[in-house]
Image: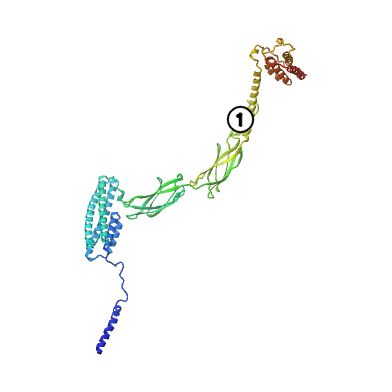
Amino acid sequence: MKRLAISLLIIVLLTIFVPSFSILAQSNHTPHENPAAAQSSPDPAALMLSYSKTFELVSSRQYQDATSLLEELEYVNIPTEINYVINRYNTLATQLITTLNNIESLLDQASTLSIHYQHTAAGQKLDAARTAIFDAQLLLQEIETATDINADSLGVFAATATSQINQAYQRLEESLHRLQELINELNRLRRIINDDPFAVISPSYYFPTLLEVSAPKTAYPGLPITISGRVTSAYGNPERTISVLLDNSQLAEDTLQGWFSLEIIPPPQTTTGKHSLTIMAAPLGRNSDASKELSIDITRLPTQTDIQVPRLVILPRPIQVSGKVLHNYFPIQDARVSLAFRESSATAKTATDGSFTTAVRLPRLSVTTPTSGNPFFASATTVELPLDLSLVGPQKLTVTVEPTEPWYAPLQIERQVFVINPSNIGLMLIALLCLGALLYNQVRSRVTVAQEEEFIPQPQMKGLPPVIPKHEIKYKLSSIKGRIVSAYRSGLEAVEKITGVAMTAHTTLREFLTTATPRLPTAAKSFSELTSIAEVALYSTHKLEEDIASRAEKLAVATKEELHGETA
């Protein structure tokens, strides 16, 4: 019994402690596998997607990236049963990439040689390209066969149509189809170069170039701006020639790599407004060109002025204007300031503090006048008169500012000044006085003529003689007309005696009065009225009154007395 009990106890103890012994028997530190050497079995769908991505890079002619991706697949843990097929697949893919890259290089060389008339060398390159294209076609066919074998090994054909592995296989087939299109395109280009050495190769032949650019939206003529960006290419990243054009004028060119920064200066004569800014990366080898076109606004910095213009101007004194030319309270030096007033102008330049002072004078007219009353006198004086016909009123004064720096905008200001021209006012008054005197004389002459016309006898009196010979007056003294004629004869005799002017047979009463009046300083008024009464008596048909005759007799007596008074 004891032996049986001891045996059972030993069995129980072993049952309890044996698991612990197995743990203690393990290593104290769990070993870690080297990540670089670690390999795992790939997911079949992921493996096919990796190959499809590789071939897509090849079809877009990104051979370097495709080679790098293919090299990464060598570290994948491939099952032993398909290890040979996968390795062969990788080898075929590598050879195809190298062959396609070589074909493009041969075509590029052949095109360059043909343009330079090296037809023999170009033909050799084209023959080599034709052989390489044939090899590429064979390699693609072997890859397609290997693809089917791999798909069968990975269980593609046994999977459903919607499974991930089947979809990955379909994508791989599409990428192989694109490889066939690339080979056909390269063969077509070979024929084009062979048939026409000067043919323009389609841009799709070259590797695309990516150009990123940033530039200011506003620029100023004569002031620099900075344009930055980056140029990259799918086939390497060599130095590229970058050009910057404003409209169609090149402003800068440099050879740069990757990120770049260029400084350009818009020409001073650039007009304001919207312009086209073009940044171009020139083609290099099989790297295509690239360009970016941006819109840039060319403008000018605003100019401000603080000017002082007189409100009242008395000509011919000059008009003086002063002030400052500024931009945001900073002075603008050497700016050209022009004043224009009527046909006169003046210019000035601003000082270092932006200030200026200038004056505009009216043009003057030189008038030569003799120094004495003798017009033939040799000496003469010259008088300068302002050549301005204005009298009084507002006039426009224009101030134009033209900065020397092209990035400043020109400015034009118009101000109104009140002008008084004393010289012209005096000349105008003299002219008005002369005109008034002339008009007065004309009016007076017209009144005299009208009075003469008023005393012209009626048609029935045309038979009366125009003169009054002394021996022919036979009116009775008792009548009113006779008394008037007698009074006139009495005054006439006194006037003839004193003045020495005789009444002829062909002289009218009015003509005698006109001739004798200058010699009658005091008696002219009395004799003039007496003459008028005599004309009425002789030529008028109106009835004469007694008082008219009495008036004529008194005027005759007054004429004699005034004449005697002059001779006394």
Is 322 drawn above or below residue 500 in the view shown? below
Question: Residue 351: horizontal and vertical position, in percent?
Answer: 55, 46
According to the picture, the residue beneath numbered tag 1 turns out to be 368
Is 389 drawn above or below residue 16 in the view shown? above
- Which amino acid lies under the numbered mark 1 shown in the image of this protein? Thr
Residue positioned most to the bottom: 2
- Classify residue 455 by image quadrant: top right
Mark 1 residue crowding within 10 angstroms, few (<14) / some (14–19) / many (20+): few
Residue 476 placement, left or right of 367? right
Is 420 drawn above or below residue 63 in the view shown? above
Secondary structure, mark 1, is strand
- In depth, the one of 285 and 478 nearer the eye is 478
* Colouring chosen for the image of the structure: rainbow
Residue shown at 28% from the left, 47% from the top: 113
Question: Residue 540: horizontal and vertical position, in percent?
Answer: 68, 16
Question: Residue 141: horizontal and vertical position, in percent?
Answer: 22, 55
- In depth, the one of 411 and 442 nearer the eye is 442
Question: Residue 511: horizontal and vertical position, in percent?
Answer: 67, 17
User: Would you say residue 519 is visible in this rendering?
Assistant: no
